[in-house]
Amino acid sequence: MDLRIQRSVVANLRNRPDAVESGPFVLGLDLSTDSPHINYATPVPGAEITPADVRGLVQAFQALKPRLEYVVSCAPELEKLLLDAGFAVESRNEYLICTPETLAVPPAPEGFELFEPETDDELAGMIAAQNDAFGGGFTSTPADVERYRRNRAKGAVQVAARTADGQYAGGGTAVAPNEGLSEVGGIAVRPQFRRRGLAGAITAAITERLFAAGGDVAWLEASGDDSWRVYERVGFRAAGQRLYIAKY
């Protein structure tokens, strides 16, 4: 599964609008944003990597912060090369996977609607709710909306949560599947709507749509014990290790 996950990350980053190939690395760049969680690199599994390759990678990021995310077992010698080049570990994360056999789809919590946003206003509302949930304030920009539309056109799944009186409560996304596998991410619920089962319902709704479209594995990362329990309840199980590492 590790190799399959890493191949899917490579494919996803190659699909970014400003992607760059630098030796054994793929930089998944989208210059409409400077977010390091969107603009990062990953190694091509099985490729030999040298210190010169790492120097070339740093140069390829130009004004952006050099940053990587990858499955550890697919490049076991890379971490030392990066540390020697001045990188620092951000976090070590366990990824979880879900299959059609393990998925459990709960109903939407009472008082909430789960739907796929279509209009610019709906997309902006979901994005603003996600940003607010992650501490960035209830904001979105036309560039954000355009990025989500572009991802949708490539096969991404997007699910928003809204209250009966029209307040955007949260949302989440999944990248376009590659070889039947897709990453679920950005699962977010604004603080005033938490502890009601909404995060699990959003995660399950996205995953269900992926499987309905022919996918066979969904994967994601948990940011802490609370989110781990949420994802386990809807059918995700621990499967491997990933590393986040950046040069400051």
Image: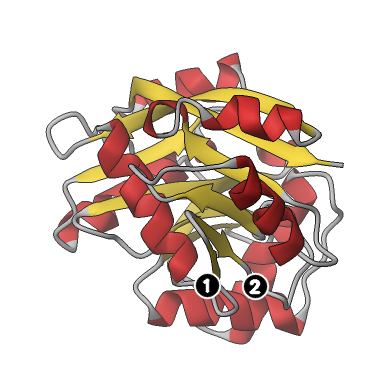
Amino acid, disc 2? Asp
Instruction: Out of 178 and 42, give the one closest to the viewer.
Output: 42
Give the crowd class for mark 1: few <14, some 14-19, many >=20 residues within 10 Å: some
Residue 219 vertical placement versus 60 (above, below): above
Say whether residue 80 is left or right of residue 85.
Answer: left
Query: Which residue was labeled with disc 2?
Result: 30
Q: Residue at x 51, y 82 (%)?
A: 150
According to the image, label 1 marks what residue? 16
x and y percentages locating residue 30 in the rendered image: 65, 72
Q: Which residue occupies the foreground of this view, 119 or 218?
A: 218
Q: Secondary structure at mark 1?
A: loop
Q: Quadrant of the C terminus?
A: top right
Tell me where residue 45 sits by quadrant.
Answer: top left
Residue 205: in sight, yes or no? no
Instruction: State the residue in front, 14 or 223.
Output: 14
Is the residue 58 above or below the residue 61 in the image? above
Check disc 2 and report its element: helix, strand or loop: loop
Left or right for 180, reference 32: left
| 16 vs 206: above or below | below
Tag shown at residue 79: none
Tag 1 and tag 2, C-beta contact below 8 Å = yes
Which residue appears at 72% of the width and 76% of the height?
31
Residue 119: name its quadrant.
Answer: bottom right
Q: Quadrant of the N terminus?
A: top left
| Rendered location of residue 217, percent (x, y) | 23, 43
Amino acid at pointer 1:
Arg
Q: Position of residue 33 (x, y in %)?
A: 75, 70
Q: Position of residue 95 (x, y in %)?
A: 43, 28
Sequence order check, earlier mark of 1 and 2: 1
